[in-house]
Each structure stands twice: as C-alpha cells, then as structure tokens.
C-alpha cells in the first residue's frame, strides 16, 4: 500500500495563495481576450484584481501565523521547520511531527488539530 505524503500547513496555505495569484492573472488575461465586450473585460479585470488582493491578504495572514509557529528541528532530516497545531509535517522531508506525548506512535491524522477532537479527548480522560 502506498504511503500517504502530507505537507505542512504553512506550505498548503502558501500554495493556495500562489494559486490565487495565477488565477487572477489568468482572469485578467481572459479579459484581454474579450476586449470586444467592454462589460466582460471590466468583470474579468475586477475579479482578477480581487483574487490578487485576496492572495495578498492570505500571504499576510500566513506570515503572522508563521511567526507564531513553533520552530523545531526535524528528527528525520535534521533541518529547522515550523509546526502549527498538535500534528504537522516537516516542510522539507514531509515527516509527520507532533509535540503531544498522547499522540506519539499513533497514525497521523489531521483531525487531531480540530477542537472537536480535543473536546472528545478531554471528555474521555
């Protein structure tokens, strides 16, 4: 069975912001291709600019989250990485990481970061 590869939360959000930038540029390019219809050009350009502005907001947000992330050294590749939440993956080698002693040795699942799981775990204790 193939092993699932996880990526760190910070990299996922950065990738989403990059996709927003490219989508915004493609929308504006679509506006150039429809230059015969003025209202359609305006809609494409407005949507493209809004997507690029949204990506800027996402980049600022992930930057502030990155400042709050816990810096650790990955035990697998021994490179510095940042960790958000109870479980995360190394930014370099995709090694699953946790600082929670209760989760050590368990199968990696992103549900461990949810509030619902934490409430259920606290009730069971």
Image: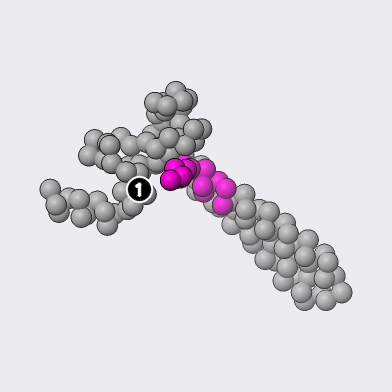
Task: Give the labeled residue for mark 1.
Answer: 109
Q: Residue at x 85, y 70 (%)?
A: 35
- Name the residue: 69% across, 62% down: 48
**Which image quarter holds the N terminus?**
top left
Residue 121 is left or right of residue 113, and the answer is left
Toward which corner of the image does residue 102 lie, by quadrant? top left
- Residue 38 among those drawn in magenta: no
20 vs 107, nearest the viewer? 107
Above or below 55: residue 38: below
Q: Is residue 71 left or right of residue 52?
A: left
Q: Residue furthest front?
A: 1
Q: Residue at x 20, y 55 (%)?
A: 120
Which region is colored magenta?
1-16
> Which residue sits at x=12%, y=48%?
125
Q: Position of residue 49 (x, y in %)?
A: 68, 60
Q: Quadrant of residue 31?
A: bottom right
Crowd rating for badge 1 (residues with CA inside 10 Å; few <14, some 14–19, many 20+): few
Q: Can residue 15 be seen in the rendering of this structure?
A: yes
Q: Is residue 78 left or right of residue 40?
A: left
Which residue sits furthest top?
A: 78
Rendered view: 27 above or below 39:
above
* Percent position of residue 11, x then y: 52, 43
Q: Would residue 65 be seen by someone viewing this image from the given angle?
A: no
Q: Is residue 34 above or below residue 65?
A: below
Q: Position of residue 62 (x, y in %)?
A: 50, 45
In the rendered structure, the answer to whether residue 53 lies left or right of residue 6 reads right
| Colour theme | one colour
SS for dot 1: loop
């Amino acid at each position: 069975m193939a092993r699932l590869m996880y990526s760190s939360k910070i990299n996922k959000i950065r990738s989403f912001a990059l996709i927003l930038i490219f989508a915004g540029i493609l929308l504006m390019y679509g506006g150039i291709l429809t230059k015969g219809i003025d209202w359609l050009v305006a809609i494409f350009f407005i949507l493209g600019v809004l997507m690029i502005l949204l990506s800027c907001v996402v980049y600022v947000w992930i930057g502030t989250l990155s400042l709050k992330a816990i810096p650790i050294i990955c035990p697998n590749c021994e490179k510095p990485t940042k960790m958000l939440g109870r479980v995360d993956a190394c930014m370099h080698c995709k090694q699953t990481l946790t600082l929670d002693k209760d989760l050590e040795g368990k199968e990696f699942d992103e549900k461990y970061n949810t509030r619902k799981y934490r409430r259920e775990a606290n009730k069971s204790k």
